[in-house]
Image: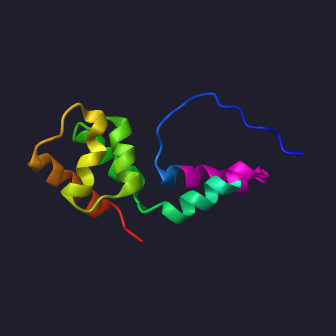
Amino acid sequence: MVTPLKITDYKNVPYGKILDVIKELLLSGRELDQIALRVNEYVNKFNKCSNYESALKKLLELGLKDVTAVLIVNIVPSTIDELKPLMNFEGEVPSKDKLEEIIKVIKSECIQS
């Protein structure tokens, strides 16, 4: 019998972190329910940033909100035009220089598959 997990907190997390948590659960011998198995399949398919921790840290250091940084790490935009729609939570679109810096971080820290 699978013991249900309980939600104790809510936090925006990158797909790579979700993969790490699921891997820990599997290594501990925990049986995953159908939802967790589907989430695992989804994030395995769509995770594009292998170095998510470093990318997230650098984006937060640039002054982005947590939710925006996680969106960027999950989607891995490669152009400013792809990046701009992800700035909804920032209040205003950052300057072109800052957008270019964000793209540089993503290109240096994330590997697109």
Q: Position of residue 108 (x, y in %)?
A: 27, 63
Q: How many marks?
A: 0
Q: Position of residue 84 (x, y in %)?
A: 23, 48
Quadrant (top left/top right/bottom left/bottom right) for the N terminus: top right
Relative to 86, 9 lies left or right? right
Q: Is residue 22 magenta?
A: yes
**Most common SS among magenta residues:** helix
The vertical placement of 88 against 110, above or below, is above
Viewer-closest of 87 and 9: 87
What colour-coding does the image apply? rainbow
Q: Position of residue 71 (x, y in %)?
A: 38, 47
Viewer-closest of 94 and 82: 82
Q: Is residue 65 magenta?
A: no
Q: In the displayed image of the protein, which residue is found farthest to the bottom?
A: 113
Residue 15 appearing in the image: yes
For residue 9, which quarter of the picture? top right
For residue 64, which quarter of the picture? top left
Q: Position of residue 86 (x, y in %)?
A: 30, 46
For residue 2, which quarter of the picture? top right
Q: Which residues are magenta?
A: 18-36
Residue at 33 percent of width and 41 percent of height? 68
